[in-house]
Image (tube, helix red, strand yellow):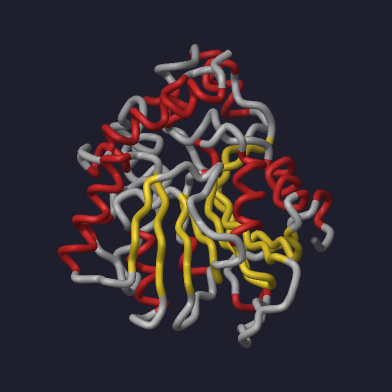
Amino acid sequence: MKTDQELKEIVRKKYSEIAEQDVALNKSSCCGAGPVSQEVYNIMTDDYSETEGYQSDADLGLGCGLPTHFAHIEKGDTVLDLGSGAGNDVFVARHETGPEGKVIGVDFSGPMIRKARLNADKLGYNNVEFREGDIEELPILDNSIDVVVSNCVLNLVPNKAAVFNEIHRVLKPGAHFSISDVVLQGELPDALQKDAEMYAGCVSGAIQKDAYLEMARKAGFKDLQIQKEKPIYIPADILSQYLTEEEMQKFGQGEQGIYSITLYGQKEGELKKEKKILQLSDMQSSEACTPGGGCC
């Protein structure tokens, strides 16, 4: 079993390589890692192309949702993107904040940070900033952020509870997050669970959905709501690299599931400025997120 630090170094090395990798490879694999599927394209990614503020040069095809779509970002907000990569979600969030707001991206891959800064320079944006750092120990002041977003990143972090605690620390009282991530229902086969490539590929680092929600709850967040949920199917030509035919059949017929969720949570307290209250009617595919379907 690898240590947390070993896992982090695997991810750091892989995502530094992905910074220069062809986007088509990323979209045809699990988050840019491991085997490439010849059967399925866009295994995890959602389509950003019609999203205002989208910059194709910053889209490396590594996300599993559209968190900015659900984040209720307002003009003048200060937004933080965890695991900002080449800047895709930062630039979309910047469109929502307007020039009067600010967007900060944090990523622990040096090559990703450099790529994001080059993209920002080309666009001439002076209200976006990219900081190299660990999202388990954010280089951000307490109570300074209006909205936190993240796209398929927490599943790559060994200590997810620490990240939720950091999100809580940096958000202003009454502020909120909207995070897209990969979670599980049921156990993965051992060969997928223990593979380093599948960890970097956003699969074996994922945890049970209920455990994920409980971490957010323990960090102090309220009004937890799943804004969107979709199943993720790993193509057979990728699974065959890890599982026997018998294991593949069992995996396909079992109760295991890999899902992308977009989760909203709010920090306790009241914002000093008036904010739109998030309503379930504003969301797509909304559902209560407590075990058993109760309200959070």
Q: State the count of labels.
A: 0
Q: Residue furthest bottom?
A: 274
Residue at the farthest front position: 141
Q: In this view, does 158 lie to the left or right of 215?
A: left
Q: Where is residue 281 in the image (x, y as percent from the top left)?
A: 65, 78
Taking the spot 48% from the left edge, 76% from the top edge, the residue there is 77
Place residue 224 in its image quadrant.
bottom right
Which residue corresponds to the image point at 45% horizontal and 16% vertical from the top-left? 242
Q: Where is residue 220 in the image (x, y as percent from the top left)?
A: 76, 56
Measured as percent of width and height from the top left, residue 64 is found at 45, 49
| Drawn side of residue 191 relative to residue 86, left or right | right
- 289, above or below 279, in the image: above
Q: Which of 121 and 57 is in front in this view?
A: 121
The picture places residue 178, in percent across and down from the top left corner, at 57, 62
Task: Look at the image and tell me in which quarter the N terminus lies.
Answer: top right
Q: Which residue is drawn at 66% across and 79% down?
A: 271
